[in-house]
Amino acid sequence: MEAMTLEENKPKGDDLQIDAVLRPGKWDEYIGQERIKANVRIMIEAAQKRGERPDHMLFYGPQGLGKTTIANLIAREMGAQMRTTSGVNMEKTGDLVSTLANLEEGDILFVDEAHRINRTIEEVLYPAMESRKLHMTIGKGPAARQLTLDLPAFTLIAATTRVNLLSAPLRSRFGAIFSMDYYEHAHIEEIIRRSARILGLDIEPIAVAAIAKASRFTPRTANRLLKRVRDFAQVKEMPVITEEAVLDTLELLEIDELGLEKWDRRLLESIITKFNGGPVGLNTLVAILGEDKGTVEEVYEPFLIKMGLLQKTSSGRTVTEEAYAHLNLKRFKVQ
Ligand code: ADE
C-alpha cells in the first residue's frame, strides 16, 4: 500500500462524523478510568469463559465521561449486538415491552438516562432483569389477559447522571455499579493528543495543556474545544496550533482559564451578589437563574463543586473564598 500523506489521511466530514471518528473503538484506545476498565474486563472475560452473559451493569456520573462509549466497547468485546434506548423515550409500559420483546440472544440493551424511567415501567424491568421474564397485559378491562414471555439471555447496561433518583429496587438488580469520575488532567491531555493525531493536527504541547485545563476534566468537552480551536486555526491559516490560538479561541467562546462558561460564572455571581455568598436553596437559585433544575444539578453544580468553587450544605448552596477570588469579587462583611 502506498503511504498516505498526513493531508490525505485527514478524516473528512462534519462535526458529528468527526465525533464518531474520535470515539475509541477498542479498549486499548480508551484512555483513563482504569479501575472501571479493569473491573468490566474481568466481568466480560469470566462470563465468556463460562459461556454466559455478563451481569447487568449500571454506570453513573457526570455527562460526557464516556458511559455510552464504554457500553459500545463492551458490546464489541462480546461480539454482541447493542440495542440502544433511553429513559426519555419510555413513556408507556408498551415502549419497554416492545424493546424487550425484540431482544435476541446475547444482546446488550443500553438504557441511557435510566433515572427517567418511571415506576410503572420499572415494574416490567425487574422480572426481565432477574429471571428473563416479560409479563404483558393483552387487551383492556375485563377481557384483559396476562401473558408471560421468556426472554433471551441479555445484559442490561444502564447509564445515568442522577443515580440517587434511581429507585432502590432497580439499583439492587444490577450486578455491578460503577461510578465514573472526572478524568485526571494527564488523561485529558492524552485524549487531546490522540484526537489531534486522528484529525491530522500539528499542535504544541503547551496548547494541548491549555485545552486540557479548560476541559472540565471531561473528554467530550476536550474534543469539543479541540474542534473549535481547529476551526480557529483553519480560518487564521495557522499551520501549527499554538497556545495563543487556544487562548484566543477560549476568549471568543467566553470560556475562562478554569473552563468556566458564562452560565457557571452567572451562577456563582448570583449567589454572591444576591445572597452574599449563600446559603441559598436550589429552588430559589434556579428561579433567579431562570434555568432548569436538572441542568443546574447535573451540569453546572458537579463541576463547580469539583473545582472547590461551590459547596452544597444542608441549608443550601454556598460559594467558597476561591469563587470570590476567581471572579475578583469581595465578600460583603456583615458588621
Ligand atoms: N474520547 C472520548 N473519551 C475517550 C477516552 N476515554 N479515551 C480516548 N478517547 C476518548
Image: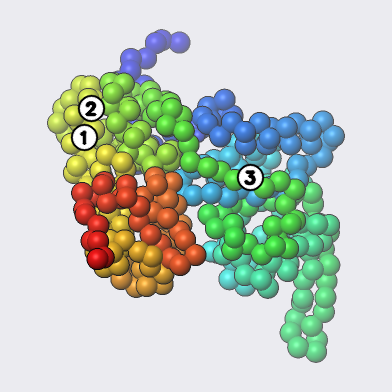
Instruction: Kindly indicate whether the residue at mark 1 contacts the one at mark 2 (C-beta within 8 angstroms).
Output: yes
Instruction: Kindly indicate whether the residue at mark 3 contacts the one at mark 1 (C-beta within 8 angstroms).
Output: no
Q: Residue at x 32, y 38 (%)?
A: 214
Secondary element under disc 3, as helix, strand or loop, is strand
Secondary element under disc 1, as helix, strand or loop, is helix
* Ligand 1 lies under 8 Å from the Cβ of mark 1: no
Q: Could one spot residue 105 in this view of the protein?
A: yes
The residue beneath circle 1 is 247
Q: Residue at x 31, y 54 (%)?
A: 264
Q: Is residue 133 left or right of residue 116?
A: right
| Quadrant where the image shows the N terminus | top left
Q: Earlier in the sequence, mark 2 or mark 3?
A: 3
Q: Amino acid at mark 3?
A: Phe
**Label drawn at residue 178:** 3
The x, y position of residue 246, in whole percent, is 24, 33
Secondary element under disc 2, as helix, strand or loop, is helix
Q: Quadrant of residue 333?
A: bottom left
**Label drawn at residue 243:** 2
Q: Earlier in the sequence, mark 1 or mark 3?
A: 3
